[in-house]
Image: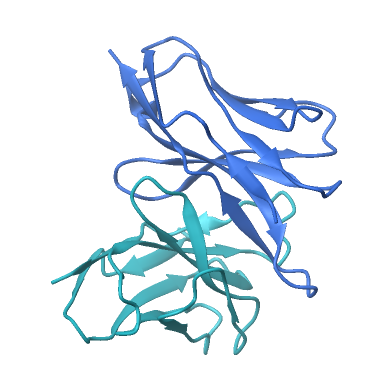
Amino acid sequence: DGGITQSPKYLFRKEGQNVTLSCEQNLNHDAMYWYRQDPGQGLRLIYYSQIVNDFQKGDIAEGYSVSREKKESFPLTVTSAQKNPTAFYLCASSPRRTLLNQPQHFGDGTRLSIL
Amino acid sequence: AQKITQTQPGMFVQEKEAVTLDCTYDTSDQSYGLFWYKQPSSGEMIFLIYQGSYDEQNATEGRYSLNFQKARKSANLVISASQLGDSAMYFCAMREALTQGGSEKLVFGKGTKLTVNP
């Protein structure tokens, strides 16, 4: 079945360490997104990508980096510059850059905690 | 910028009863779209229903329906015949343009936690 796979499900980061969250989709979608969710909050956009080799900052990009070398893959790196990385991270994709009436499809998320 | 407000942090409903989850929005766009998602405790976001601003009828999808009142800028989700499996967080979201290139993102409300009691 087509879908979005995020790994790992749980991740722990030590102080000063960079960690990378994986997001792979086999839906042949052009657009991919990374969201952050804090307890009691909605989702906030970190980065998005419309096509391969292109990505843009979202609302809370500081301390994060991404790459889009393949259509299927959009990994997110949480750098040591992100001082409060503990959160739930969700990856999403959509068929095209304009959503119209098509919902974004989401992965199952990665829960990141500080050791 | 768009804004989504969900004023009910938590709601309780008895199994088999109907429940309404509130959502109000703020936008200056004439054309817009509203989505509702369900997030179980496992974390994945499940799309439930969509309402476009120009849709003449309220959206329905199985036990889910939208009470869309454009003049009041509200898009409340109605769940009929609640089931225990409906216990989850529910998020209202709206499309928002990202760049002039036509990209869009979703702007989310803070969510409502629904608990269905047996």
- Where is residue B30 drawn, in percent x and y? 86, 46
Q: Residue at x 55, y 66 (%)?
A: A27
Residue situated in front as seen by the camera: A29 or B45: B45
Residue B68 place in picture, x, y as percent = 72, 27
Give the residue drawn at x 65%, y 64%. Answer: A95
Image-quadrant location for residue B99: bottom right
Give the residue furthest to the front. Answer: A83
Colour of chain B in the rendered structure image: blue
Query: Is residue B38 shown above or below A68?
Result: above
Residue sitting at 40 percent across and 81 percent down?
A63
- Indicate the colour of chain A: cyan
Q: Tell me which residue sits at (59%, 82%) in the image.
A: A55
Q: Nearer the viewer, residue A78 or B57?
A: A78
The C terminus of chain B: image quadrant: top left
Q: Could you say where residue A2 lies in the image, as x and y percent from the top left?
A: 49, 61
In the image, residue A43 lies at what x, y percent? 47, 55
In this rendering, does residue B61 appear at all? no
